[in-house]
Image: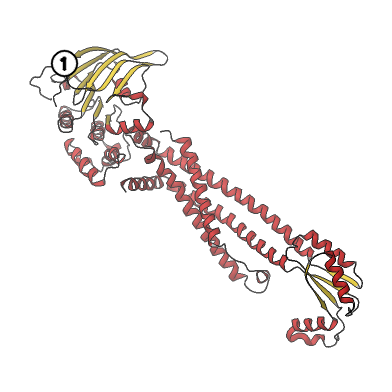
Amino acid sequence: MQFLTYILCQTGKNLRQTWGAQVMTLLTVTLSVLIFAFFFLIYTNMLRASAQLGDDVRLIVYLDQEVTEQMRPVLETRIRDFGPVEKIVFVSRAEAFARLSAQMGKEKDVLNDLGPDFLPPSLEVYPLKNLNDLSKINQFSDFLQTLPYVTKVQSGLDWLQRFGYFTSLLRIVVLLSGSLLIISMTFIVSYTLRLTVLSRQGELEILRLLGASSAYIRLPLLLEGMLQGVLGSSLGLAALYILYQWIVSRFSGPGFLKLFEFTFFPFELTAAILLAGIVLCTVGSLFSIRRFIRI
Amino acid sequence: MPRDASTDKPLVELVNITKIYPPDIVALEDVSLRIYKGEILFLTGMSGAGKTTLIKLLFCLETPTRGLIEIAGRDLFRLSPVGIQQMRQKIGVAYQDFRLLDKQTVFQNIAMAMEVTYASAKEIRVRVGELLDLLNLASKRNKPVGELSRGEQQRVALARAAANRPTLLLADEPTGNLDQTTTELVINLFRRLNEEDGSTIVVATHDESIYAKTEHRVVELHNGQLAAHLEQTPRQVELF
């Protein structure tokens, strides 16, 4: 207990003696965590959205005439022979018109002059959910194009591809901001601790002569780094949560965020980021202790 | 505390100690000396005689070029870092240059020695108060050391050395900046430490007034060599 009291007192003394540098370090750590966690939050949401989109992939095959009852099994067999599908839905002109009417809601009157036959019949092919490779879906699309009566195959793959590219780009940003986080946290904490050591050089020397243990001298410095990690990471994550709430409230109307569920990190991931921050700051302080303290 | 050399084991034993500073400055040459537990020993000699070097060697601040130093039967220079740290907690040193923290108060400077041994706040308060009274520094308790006179700083350094009731107290020129009255306070502190706590005390000094009439042993260093080894006979003394 006495030991702990002394270590905490020494840590407090260190923080007081270099408070200016400590505040700057805290801000840097907070900002680093905020930048990294912000991009990581977007990335994880994009990944989830990407998975959702992948699940919803369907290929719409527009036909130039209605498929007869005799033709249905033939088409189904040819499609299933090419690749496994979850289901195939035949949509007649009348069904397509009914769907569109339903989607138009109160404005369906605009369709009155067009008549129920103006939409083409179609086939909706739902590939198996595990077929999430875009190139394979592309091949599937090309195959469907070769079927009889087919005028056009619409897959929405272009959009999915662009979404995939964006996610990849975001992954790079996350990796870069992660590296920035590692470098800035370890470097700045190590540098601040160096200032503490230099400002207390005389005192540390006297403590050594008085027989202070290695723990007595080193632990407060280690604790100082850990505290920077705890406070900096907590503040960074708290700032991100406030930003997240603002985004959700600001963009909660119809639009991009309506398409996907934009969620915050689960507890485990939040704890992992906090822990990573603490570990990085502690490593930074260890660097300084090993380099500048000789006992 | 009287000692009986025939039965006592030496607390400190120096065997053929030589210390040469680069390039070839001989600070100590072939010095052998035994210091017994509970003894007060005066190490005298002119400036540059090797007194400070000897004190530094006893505290592991320097390593000898040749020879062996044992404290309580343990080779000083084979101690592990933890061993040195533990040994330093039992040895109080009052340095010639004081080595105090100017911005810290008198109380903080003295308390520091006890804090590293994890003494309780109450123990520290009591002990530091006692030492401040003994050395007539009570009124300076909360003053930064940097604002004190040299003589006051010297007493703070002595109080810090005595704070842990050390087994061995090494004082390097402890009265160099003191007048007769405060010198007596310091001598009184040594006597109390020796008699009440059984501390062994080594005083390196060239101030003849503090050892001239002592009943304790006086060892003289001359150009790094042991010049005289005087066993004083008990007699009426003014200071001791």
Q: Nearer the viewer, residue A209 or B14?
A: B14
Q: Examine the rendering and report whether any part of residue B139 can be seen.
A: no
In the rendering, at what x and y percent does residue A127 appear?
Answer: 77, 67
In the rendering, at what x and y percent does residue B64 appear?
Answer: 36, 19
In the rendering, at what x and y percent does residue A255 appear?
Answer: 68, 71
| Other residues around mark 1 within 10 Å, as few (<14) / some (14–19) / many (≥20) | few
**Where the C terminus of chain A falls, by quadrant?**
top left
Residue at x-position 85% and y-position 80%: A119
Please give left or right for residue A82 compared with residue A180 in the image: right
The amino acid type of the residue labelled 1 equals: Glu
Determine which quarter of the picture holds residue A48: bottom right
Residue at x-position 80% and y-position 67%: A155
Q: Examine the rendering and report whether any part of residue A86 can be seen.
A: yes
Residue at x-position 54% and y-position 59%: A268
Please give left or right for residue B19 compared with residue A236 in the image: left
Q: Which residue is mark 1?
A: B231
Q: Chain of mark 1?
A: B
Residue at x-position 63% and y-position 69%: A261
